[in-house]
Amino acid sequence: MTDTVTATPWVRRFHPAGQAPARLVCFPHAGGSATYYFPVSRALSPDADVLAVQYPGRQDRRSEPCVDDVRVLADLVVAELLPWCDRPVTLFGHSLGATLAFEVALRLEAEGIVPRTLFASGRRAPSRHREHERVHLSDDAHLVGTIKRMSGTDAGLLADEEVLRAVLPAIRGDYKAAETYRYRPGDLLACPVVVLNGRSDQEVTVEEAQAWAGQTTGPCVLRWFTGGHFYLNDHAAQVIEVIRESLRATV
C-alpha cells in the first residue's frame, strides 16, 4: 500500500502513515483549525493515517474568504477528500465539524464510499436546530464572550487585540455556517454513528444528542463525558482510545 496523493491547503497530514490500513479525517470546530488535531494525529500514527481539514480564512489560509455555508463547504471538502479514499475512511467532527462531517459523509456515500464510522462530538443532531441562535449577528464583544464561555479558544489569544482582529472573521463566518444550517428531511446515512458529548454542555441536550440515531440507518451509540462543550480537552486520552478501538474493529 503506497500513497497516491499529497497534502493540500485543505488537507493537513501531520504524521504521514502511508502504510496504515485506514484513514481518520478530522473536522475542526467553529473558529478552529487543523492544528487542533495534531495530538490526535501523533497518538494514532502509524496505526491510522490522520488527516485534518483546514478551512479557509484561518492560519496560513487567513487571506482566503471564509465559507459560511455548510453545504458549500462540504462540496469543497469532498472534492479534496476523494483522492484519499483509497482505503477505509472514518470521520471525526467536533461542534460545527460534526455537522460538516455529516454532510461530507452523505456526499461520500453518494459516491459509493461508506465511512466506517462517523464520530459526532459536541453537536446536536442535524435535524435539530435552535431558531433563537444569532451569535453570528452579534457585536464583537458578544461573540468573544460566547467563545470564552465555551472555552474553545485560548483566553490569551482573545486578549491580544491584533490576534483578535485576525481570528474574528473566521469565527463569525463559522458561526453563521452553523446557525443557518438546516437539515433536509430524508438525508440519511448508512454508516454507524458514535455520538460524544460533555454532560454539562449547554449546546447539546440529551434529546438533541439522541436524535442522531434518526440520521442513519446504521447503529448509533452515545458516549458521555464529564465537562462542557470542550469536554474533549480534558478527556483527550479517552476520546482517542474510543477512536482507536473503532478503527481496530472496522479495518
Image (cartoon, helix red, strand yellow):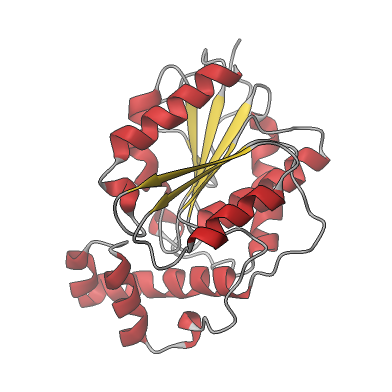
Is residue 217 rendered to the left or right of residue 66?
Answer: right
Whether residue 41 is visible here, answered yes or no, is: no
Residue 164 image offset from top left, x and y in percent:
29, 74
Q: Residue at the location (60% across, 20% down)?
A: 250
Q: Quadrant of the C terminus?
A: top right
Is residue 45 rendered to the left or right of residue 39?
Answer: right
Is residue 169 rendered to the left or right of residue 119?
Answer: left
**Quarter of the rendering containing residue 30:** bottom left
Residue 129 image offset from top left, x and y in percent:
61, 71
Residue 185 image offset from top left, x and y in percent:
80, 62
242 above or below 72?
above
108 above or below 128?
above
Q: Quadrant of the N terminus?
A: top right
249 above or below 141?
above
Between 114 and 219, which is closer to the camera in this rendering?
Answer: 219
Whether residue 241 is visible here, answered yes or no, is: yes
Q: Residue at the location (28% across, 71% down)?
A: 149
